[in-house]
Amino acid sequence: MIFSVLIVNNRGKPRLVKFYVPIDEEKRLPLVGAIYDVVSQRSDKMCNFFDGNHIENEELKKWGGDIKFIYRHFATLYFIFVVDGTESELGMIDLIQIYVESLDQYFENVCELDLIFHSNKVHQILDQVISGGLILEVEPQMILNRIKEQDDFVKQTKKESKKKKKKKGRK
């Protein structure tokens, strides 16, 4: 199971924080900070995953003993997945790649500003990949097709709403 997906910039500022397990609001940022501290201090020559005993945190203990942190560093952003011991490290690295590719294709060269100014789309794309801590889709083109369908539905609904308002105004 995937417990959390985090995107944090090089300065430790969270750009996306999504938890699939209950965690108190006031405990989220300290946990993200603790995870970032460990990830950011790791050399680029080290592997992109490590187990949960590198981080002392009460919230992590509640999730169970076998926790892994899997991450990738792209430009100025760390993409971090917190998962249980049953998840494949290489599978999760591949899932991070799929998510980043989906973002990159949607935003046509994604950058940190896209994450800031279009956070709703970033979450929407993530929700097409993962729901409730379980993987839904691993094909970037399918993910983008679903996002396009949702965008088209919203446009159509807005268009119909405007037509109804115009008709009401004429009566």
Image (cartoon, helix red, strand yellow):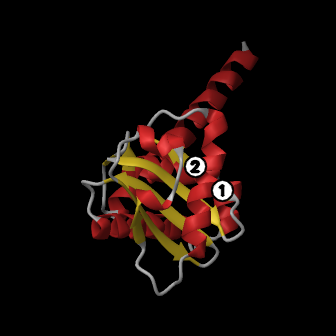
Identify the residue at image location x=31%, y=50%: 135
As helix, strand or loop, the secondary structure at mark 2 comes to strand
Identify the residue at image location x=48%, y=72%: 72
Three-letter code, disc 2:
Val
Quarter of the figure with residue 49: bottom left
Measured from the top left, where is residue 163 in percent x and y? 63, 29
Identify the residue at image location x=42%, y=57%: 52
Measured from the top left, where is residue 3 in percent x and y? 41, 46
Quarter of the figure with residue 61: top left
Q: Residue furthest right?
A: 169
Measured from the top left, where is residue 109 in percent x and y? 57, 75
Query: Label for residue 14?
Result: 1
Relative height, residue 119 to residue 92 (above, below):
above
Relative height, residue 150 to residue 137 (above, below):
above
Count neighbours of disc 1 (C-alpha within 10 A) and say few if under 14, some if 14 to 19, many if 20 or more.
Answer: some
- Where does the C terminus fall, quadrant-wise? top right
Q: Which residue lies furthest to the bottom in this view?
A: 45
Foreground: 66 or 119?
Answer: 66
Q: Are marks 1 and 2 in contact (CB under 8 Å)?
A: yes
Query: Label for residue 17?
Result: 2
